[in-house]
Amino acid sequence: MSLKSFKSDLLEKRVQIITTDMSGKVTASDDALIPLKKGSSLQDIDPFFEAIVPLVSAEAELLEFPCVNLKTDENEFVLDIELRYGDGELIAILYDFSEHYRRSHPVVQEKNENTILANQLLVEQTIANEKEALKNSFISKLSHELRKPLGNMMGFVNLLKDSNLNYDQAEMLKIVRQTGLHIEELLNDLLDISKISQGTLNLKSVSFKMKDVTKHLKDMFSLKAKTKRIEFEVNMHDNVPAVLIGDPIRVKQILINLVDNAFKNTPKGKVLLDISVDYSRAKKVSLRFSVSDTGYGIKDAELPKIFDSYYQIDQLLSPTEGQGLGLKIVDDLVKLQKGKTKVKSKVGEGTQFEVSLPFEVPLRAEKKPPRKKAIDVDERIRVLCVDDAELDQMLIMKILINEGFISMDLALHGEMALQLIDLKSYDVILLDLDLPILNGIEFLKRLRAERKTKKIPVVVLTAMAGAEYQKEAEALGISAYLTKPYQPKELVKAIKAAFKEKEK
Amino acid sequence: MEVSKKIVLIGHFGVGKTSLVRRYVDSAFSEDYLVTLGVQVKKKQIELDDNQVNLIIWDLEGNAKVENMRSSYMLGTDGFLYVFDLTRPITFNNLNENLEFIKKQYPKAPVKIVGNKADLFDGNDLDEFLTKNKLEQVITTSAKEGTNVATVFEELARELL
Ligand SMILES: Nc1nc2c(ncn2[C@@H]2O[C@H](COP(=O)(O)OP(=O)(O)OP(=O)(O)O)[C@@H](O)[C@H]2O)c(=O)[nH]1
Ligand SMILES: [Mg+2]
């Protein structure tokens, strides 16, 4: 609204003056806006006056009402209205501001509409967020719950594998084991997905060699390539820096998922992993990982959906071989690392996934520390296992006996463990976190508070895979944090490493 | 006996004050939102327990804070309808503040709290929603479907007699 038009409104405003008796009955009117019949009263113009007329008196001699919407038989007005008391009379002054108010109406209208829209979006967003959070916490709880029994089962499967089985039994057990590993993989994927969307998956920033990553991949897929008679080639361009800074575990996870997906969808031909430099600038480099296959290909209409978790889950539930959650994980992990994913495909010819990831390059390649001689299984290692679950204890015991450890004691909870430690000395403590009476974290605190026990290495074995638990335990000083289910090899390695640490 | 009572509708903008009055007085509803500027007054005559009651209904422009509203509009008010929008939390988050202000400034005028747009909820969801937000004392209405609209006005009118 310009000052000029406002002023012209004021100058051109039309005014009607009406006098009435104290009940509102008209005695005189100039009829400038609204013609009034003889003998009529203010209340006949509009119900607005009904509640107002009785309020005017010698005590309340001026009442002002801006912006009153009035409708008469002929016209609609927006008026500012004044009611005055004067010598037993009532004077009504009607200022016609209809034009002025009508001009400002669209401005208010737009402002209010925008605000309401924003309110509604906020509500929808909040509901969506709540649902997502609920879903994530359900998924992570569920996968934790499933890990425990699966861990027990896999533990015994591993033990069974090393016992005397005939050929048929061994073959059947192999299938059981593979199926178990597959479930384990799916659970880990689910957990990762929920961690990423909850923002609790922390990326590491360490120096690593891309060669080690590709070697791992080659080892992992060479057998599969042989059995499926598919060629698997890894091609790393010469200008890819030998040493990079980033999260090798997550890079590996991305590539394993992409290569695995390619193998699944390729009946014959070739799977190629090509690693090249996208661009490099000072200390930063972006690498392009391309995984292409000569497989079935994906229909154009399906392409936009392949990274969708629901789509993947649908596939998973279908009776045909499931695609797993691999591609969803790839997409999530790439986004988390601020990279990009692209996919091209032709039905009957094959598919190409392209992932770009940023890394840092160390100024000078760091020297590898000289390799220390591995120590052999030491029968002298005295182990205390603190775990309340019978199956878990049995499993650990069997693994350790198989590996030649002979000294192991059991405690069912932290309190009991402290008593044992008081009586005997131990080289390594295996600790479950979820314990009755004195839980794992409290036990660790007590252990670390005593001079005598401060230095005993502790290996945590737990089904609680959350980063928070691990952080809390690590802050108290532990040698390793293994989440159930773990491989027997991992456990043995962790115990030996912890022992070595103590010997130093 | 014939009496006149002034009822004032207040609340945030867009909550459906004008729509409630239209539904009650003209038995009509529109999906379009037309902002009210200032005030528009309508009248409805009803019979209540052998009384002829003239309800003078003041439909005011929306405002988040009652404190900021033009006080001349409130002169001579017999009762208030405080209207909010069940689907927009912002319109009831400051409900208590506003009610306290009204109670202090107009101690004699009863206030009815009206949660409008109930048609946008499923039956059970609405109960759950009201409990969750501690809004059990609220009357829920739908200007769109006419649910509870006459009830709200007439319950207030009865309190004024
Ligand atoms: N679904 C639904 N929509 C409603 C209902 N009541 C009002 N609306 C809609 O809500 C919007 C706002 O209604 P109004 O009656 O103009 O709201 P108001 O409180 O008078 O708004 P202001 O005059 O700006 O304070 C319009 O689009 C109406 O159609 C209802 O009960 N159900
Ligand atoms: Mg309105």
Image: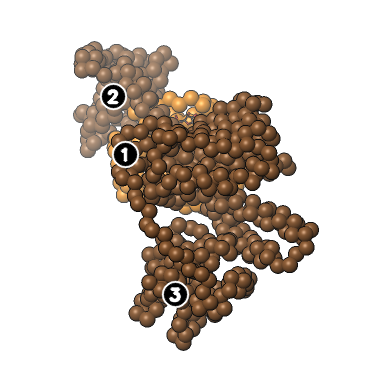
Under mark 1, the amino acid is Lys
Q: Secondary structure at mark 2?
A: strand
Q: Which mark is residue A332?
A: none
Q: Looking at the image, is mark 1 or mark 3 earlier in the sequence? A: 1
Task: Give the mark, 1 or 2, whose residue is nearer the N terminus.
Answer: 2
Residue A1 x, y percent position in the rendering? 26, 19
Left or right, A136 with reference to A11: right
| Mark linked to residue A80 | 2
Residue under mark 2: which chain is it in? A
Q: Look at mark 3 in the image and give the residue it sits on.
A: A443
- Looking at the picture, tell me which residue is in the foreground, B78 or A10: A10
Q: Amino acid at mark 2?
A: Asp
SS under mark 1 = loop
The verdict on label 3 being within 8 Å of ligand 1 is no
Circle 3/circle 2 CB separation < 8 Å: no
Classify mark 3: helix, strand or loop.
Answer: helix
Question: Is residue A379 in sight in this rendering?
Answer: yes
Which residue occupies 39% across, 17% down? A76
Q: Residue A53 appears at what percent x and percent y?
A: 32, 31
- Residue in the image at 45% along x and 50% along y: A201
Name the colour assigned to chain B in the rendering: orange
